[in-house]
Amino acid sequence: MRVAHLRILKDEKLCRNCGFCSTVNKCLNVNCVGCLACYYACPYEARKIIGDRSERKTIRVMVNGTWHMVPEKISVKEALKFSGY
Ligand code: SF4
Ligand code: SF4
């Protein structure tokens, strides 16, 4: 499945190694789901949004007792949108 998706990269030239994203706003995701939390939290604007149209698998999620098929590596908010909420 190909969907427009956001992903965040760290711009090493702008990063000042303040540690905010590894302590206070630590991301626990193995793969970026584009939630933008680190983008808004970085005090030095070192997080950049990029578009990602790479191929991705479809996974099953259950919402209110019903299974829905959604692309992998998306936020809960996006998964709910795909599920019609
Ligand atoms: S919060 Fe921003 S400036 Fe600080 S370490 Fe993370 S990416 Fe670098
Ligand atoms: S905090 Fe959100 S946007 Fe930032 S790397 Fe983690 S999943 Fe991606």
Image (spheres, rainbow, N blue to C red):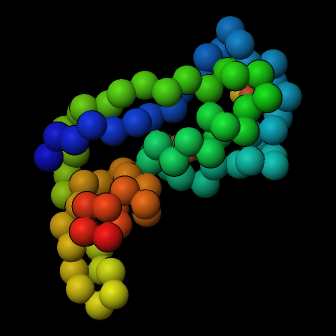
Figure quadrant of residue 75: bottom left
Q: Residue furthest top?
A: 13
| Residue plotted at (22% across, 41% down) | 3
Q: Could you say where residue 72 lies in the image, as x and y percent from the top left?
A: 30, 54
Q: Could you say where residue 52 lies in the image, as x and y percent from the top left?
A: 32, 31
Q: Nearer the viewer, residue 36 or 14?
A: 36
Q: Is residue 31 left or right of residue 51?
A: right
Q: Is residue 61 left or right of residue 36?
A: left
Q: Residue furthest bottom?
A: 65
Q: Residue furthest right?
A: 18
Relative to 66, is 46 above or below?
above
Which quadrant of the frame does ligand 2 lie within?
top right
Relative to 55, is 44 above or below?
above
Figure quadrant of residue 71: bottom left
| Residue plotted at (85% across, 28% down) | 18
Q: Nearer the viewer, residue 57 or 53?
A: 53
Q: Residue furthest left?
A: 1
Count of numbered circles on the image: 0
Q: Could you say where residue 47 lies in the image, as x and y percent from the top left?
A: 62, 26
Quadrant location, the C terminus: bottom left
Q: Could you say where residue 7 lies in the image, as x and y percent from the top left?
A: 44, 34
| Residue plotted at (81% across, 49% down) | 24
> Would residue 27 be visible to someone looking at this image?
yes
Q: Is residue 73 left or right of residue 19?
A: left
